Image: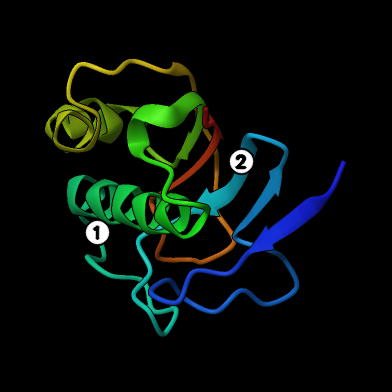
Amino acid sequence: MAKEAIVPKDVMPARGFSHAMKVGNTIYVAGQTATDEAGNIMFKGDIVAQTGRAYENIKRTLAAAAGAKMTDIVMMNVYCRDLDGFVKTGEARKQYFGKHFPAATVVQIQRLLLPDALIEIEVIAVVD
């Protein structure tokens, strides 16, 4: 089965990885953080705003993969530095997912690759 690297134009350039891989009708999206198009972390210290930006980067990456949508997501893994802060991110999630509830795992970790990142989210989507 063919594998296609997804290179969205409106997400930071990937260095040493692909933002997503499409295999058949499944899209594997690498962990997304609150980066702008140049790779700078946005909203330092604000996990709610960072979560919204990470979702936006996921949305943009999925759109670059044959027009996939957030409602195509079937699995989401969330890595955050503060579970107490994560509890406050529900409105951002609702904004991007509405009543769509993919399977999800949330894990608190000590740190992420980018020092100012408070959250990183990876997803798997399936398109028809």
Image: 93 above or below 12: above
Q: Are marks 2 and 1 in contact (CB under 8 Å)?
A: no
Q: For this view, does 66 lie left or right of residue 2?
A: left
> Quick one: 120 or 122, which is closer to the camera?
122
Q: The residue tagged with tag 1: helix, strand or loop?
A: loop
Tell me how far mark 2 sits from mark 1, CA to CA: 30 Å
The percent position of residue 83, horizontal first and vertical second, equals: 35, 28
Where residue 122 sits in the image (x, y, percent)? 54, 41
Point out residue 21 in the picture as x, y percentages from the top left corner: 69, 51
Q: Amino acid at mark 1?
A: Gly
Number of dots carrying numbers: 2
Residue 57 rendering spot, x and y as whole percentages: 37, 58
As drawn, the residue found furthest toward the right would be 1
Q: Is residue 80 left or right of residue 95?
A: right
Quickly name the residue at label 2: 27
Sequence-wise first label, 2 or 1: 2
The amino acid sitting under disc 2 is Ile
- Residue occupying the point 38% across, 69% down: 35
Q: Quadrant of the N terminus?
A: top right
